Image (tube, coloured by chain):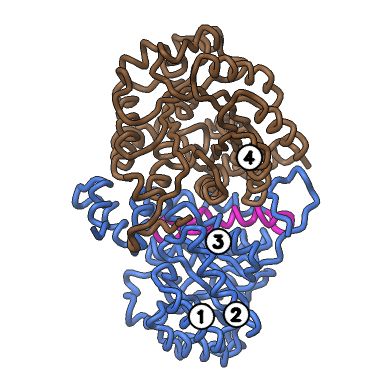
Chain colours: A blue, B brown
Amino acid sequence: MEEKISHKKAPRQSPKTAILDCTLRDGGAMNSSRFSDKTARAVYDACADAGVDYVEVGYKNSRRFFDPSVYGDWRFCDESALRRVFGENPRPIKIAVMADAGKSDYRAAIPRKSESIVSLVRVATYARGLGEALDIVKHAADMGYETSVNLMATSSLSDAELDDAFGLCVESDAGIVYMMDSFGALTPRAFDNVFSRCLAAARGRGKRVGVHIHDNLQLAFANTISAIRGGADIVDGAIAGLGRGAGNCRTEMLAGYFSPRTDIRPILWCAQNEIEPMREKLRWGFAGAYMLTGIFGAHPSKAMEFMRGENGKSLAEFYDELCPL
Amino acid sequence: MEEKISHKKAPRQSPKTAILDCTLRDGGAMNSSRFSDKTARAVYDACADAGVDYVEVGYKNSRRFFDPSVYGDWRFCDESALRRVFGENPRPIKIAVMADAGKSDYRAAIPRKSESIVSLVRVATYARGLGEALDIVKHAADMGYETSVNLMATSSLSDAELDDAFGLCVESDAGIVYMMDSFGALTPRAFDNVFSRCLAAARGRGKRVGVHIHDNLQLAFANTISAIRGGADIVDGAIAGLGRGAGNCRTEMLAGYFSPRTDIRPILWCAQNEIEPMREKLRWGFAGAYMLTGIFGAHPSKAMEFMRGENGKSLAEFYDELCPL
């Protein structure tokens, strides 16, 4: 596999791994999924223009859990909203949505594939919610979609827990088994351990393997490259890294890395004109407090609270607060 | 080698690799080496408190090349300036300085070790300047210092050029041979290639091996970890990543990674109180334009010019300008 990112030595062979852009879905954690139609369409068009394989446009979650006076259309992804912005999906890109285990009225929210412009339904879950997650996966598969089960917070699981969880995932109807580093806490060696366990479980069972990495330790791109080199079938990115807390691996990095199969220019345009203007308000991306939750494998919500500065603590004091000693 | 960064599973064994903090030296590229005495002392103290092994406080360059009405004391590192701030170096940390090949009056600037509080003289050079660089190394070694030769812009060299350059380095008086990724252009595989060639040349010749990585592709920490796992003897960091362009691997990341041998708290304090307040003015750190010079293996000065915005170009236009096609 050729992986030199430089364009000086063209032609090169691009990795075959698929790219999924989750800007509108994971970014929804920072703005309550309140993207304008213009921004949503711009992300979709940029990804299609760039040659990205999937664009995940939001959640299929329930208004029972998310007040629609607070959360925008991309928290629910009704077909009417999808068609308003993306029409009948005329571009050569697949649309994905995510249902959260425990937060989705999935039987009502996920219609037959013939009635939807969605191609892939992803189901995110902690290990403890895997039972319901796989019920959602089964429903989506029965309705005719590509499906994935996305195991969150893998950094917090023991090897035995990882093997148990991945074992359940590969016996399910999911076509893709994803390992998520939700806390951005996996150093390269720890990443290799989780990824190799996921891969070992999925191989031979006909499952694809995906990875989704947060950037708390500034390792999102590096661990994603490691997955690509190690045989991942699909990897996640977000434009300008937009996502919860420290954010995700950047889609523009992946588009550069996968060149010439992909074109970085449309992603650069979208990052500069649609996403970066939101940074001052939404404040995603690497920061010292996110680094510390990454070091301790803690949920980024603690860092987000610290960064609101309501308690006036220093970073060193925040460290002491996280430290179990 | 244990490398899990999490503190949940203490006790752990820290890597034995030495850490060199180059905040005051590499950061000098962004402020003409005009750090206040207070900031310089704060960096020195934070590094000493944290258990960092070396603190590089500036350049040993010549006033013939750098106008002292423009450049501060840390571009020249006269013994009088060093002693004004660091006294006789009372803390358990070694002081380093860097001479640039072609820009240093090294015979005048580097006195006998007995007259200096400096322990390590590093000499930075492009491959084409290696002859003079090794003359400086010889002088510094003759004067009694630890020495290193730091090969810059390794991403721009062919395998044969790398082998030739490292071959000359290991035959020299330098105690440490450093590979620098000055342009932050090395993907993990390309990094492995350069690092392994450096290591292969140095092993058996009694030389230590060092790495210094810029963060244009957000791979500085990842490639530095790779070097640590691969047997590097010394690695560079900078507090809050302060350094030219996209900046360096963060010392706080290294201090977290090397815990419990190192204590991250003093570095966090210094980052928050001394370094981050300079960010708005100095504008170092990852940005799309630095990513693009990294992708193309170009000098970051092109990105710095772009970011001054004098020409009003978009990032996509900057990409086209860099693209050789």
Determine if residue A118 is in view. Answer: no
Q: Residue furthest right?
A: A11
Q: Are marks 1 and 2 in contact (CB under 8 Å)?
A: yes
From the image, tell me which residue sits under label 1: A166
Question: Could you tell me which residue is drawn at 50 percent across and 24 percent down?
Answer: B146
Residue B102 picture quarter: top right
Residue A129 in picture, x, y percent from top left: 39, 83
| Mark 4 element type | loop
Residue A62 in picture, x, y percent from top left: 38, 81
Can residue A217 be found in the magenta stretch?
no
From the image, tell me which residue sits under label 4: B203
Question: Could you tell me which residue is drawn at 43 percent across and 34 percent down?
Answer: B21
In this view, B293 is above or below A39 = above
Q: Which residues are magenta?
A: A237-263
Q: Are marks 1 and 3 in contact (CB under 8 Å)?
A: no
Please name the amino acid that badge 2 sits on. Answer: Ala
In the depicted view, which residue is nearer to us: B68 or B255? B255
Q: Are marks 2 and 3 in contact (CB under 8 Å)?
A: no
Give the label, 1 or 3, closer to the camera. 1
Q: Chain of mark 1?
A: A
**Marked residue nearer the N-terminal end (1 or 3):** 1
**Marked residue nearer the N-terminal end (1 or 2):** 1
Residue A192 in picture, x, y percent from top left: 54, 64
